[in-house]
Image (cartoon, grey):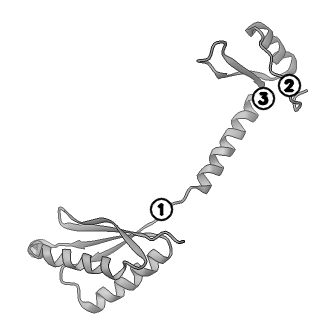
Amino acid sequence: MVGDKVEPKIVSIDEALKISSSLGLDLVEISPKVDPPVCKVIDYKKFIYDQKKKQKAIKSKAQKVVVKELRFGPNTGEHDFEFKLKHARNFLEGGSKVKAFVFFRGRSIIFKDKGHILLLKLAQALEDVGVVENMPKLEEKKMIMIIAPKKKQ
C-alpha cells in the first residue's frame, strides 16, 4: 500500500496517527495554515532525501557567474593595452564577466581622466562581444568598470 496512490480522505488526527503507525510511516503536516490542516502519511527520511536531491539538481542547473579581473595603470602603454584587450575578448567569449580597473598609486591619482579614457576605450573595443554593466566609477584608488558578455542568439 506504500507505493499505491490512495484517495485523499478527511480523517481526525487520532485516526491519521493510527493509520501512519500501522503502516510504519510518518504523519507529516504539509499545510498548517489551512482549516483543516493538510497532512500526509509518508516516509519522512525518504521525503527529506528527495527534497535535498531536488535542491541539488536546481543548484547544479543554476548558471555560475565567473568574474575575471584586468588591472591597468593610468599610463598603460599601447602594446600592454592590446595584450589585455585580447585576454578580455577571450574571457567574454568564454562567458565570463570582466572587471577592468585602473589602479592609481600614490600621486598618480591626478591622472583620473587618463584612467577613465582607458576604460572607455576598452569598452568601445569590446562592444561586439560585451555590454558595459557598470560605467567607470572611482572607488578610493581604483576606477572600476564591469563588462558582461553579450547574450548568444
State the image coordinates of residue 25 (x, y, percent, origin top left): 81, 23
State the image coordinates of residue 54 (x, y, percent, origin top left): 67, 45
Identified by mark 3, the residue type is Asp
Q: Nearer the viewer, mark 3 or mark 1?
A: 1
- The numbered mark at residue 43 is 3
Task: Using the image as rendered, state which of residue 106 and residue 111 is in the foreground.
Answer: 111
Q: Tell me if residue 110 comes above or below residue 49 in the rendering.
A: below
Query: Where, quadrant-wise, is the C terminus in this rendering?
Result: bottom right
State the image coordinates of residue 107 (x, y, percent, origin top left): 8, 73
Q: Tell me if residue 47 comes above or below residue 135 in the rendering.
A: above
State the image coordinates of residue 87 (x, y, percent, origin top left): 41, 82
Residue with the most extreme right position: 1
Find residue 1 and report its image quarter: top right
Task: Using the image as rendered, state which of residue 26 and residue 32 is in the foreground.
Answer: 32
Task: Using the image as rendered, state which of residue 143 and residue 134 is in the foreground.
Answer: 134
Q: State how far apart marks 1 and 2 are (Cα).
A: 44 Å
Which element type, helix, strand or loop, lies under badge 3?
loop
Query: Residue drawn at (69%, 35%), measured in percent from left and top?
Result: 48
Find residue 9 and report its image quarter: top right
Which element type, helix, strand or loop, lies under badge 1?
loop
Identified by mark 2, the residue type is Val
Mark 1 vs 2, N-terminal side:
2
Q: Tell me if residue 14 comes above or below residue 59 in the rendering.
A: above
- Number of other residues with Cα within 10 Å of mark 2, as a class: few under 14, some 14 to 19, many 20 or more: few
Mark 3 vs 2, N-terminal side:
2
- The numbered mark at residue 65 is 1
Residue on which the image places disc 2: 6
Mark 3 vs 1, N-terminal side:
3
Which element type, helix, strand or loop, lies under badge 2?
loop
Find residue 3 and report its image quarter: top right
Q: Nearer the viewer, mark 3 or mark 2?
A: 2
Residue 140 falls left or right of residue 135: left
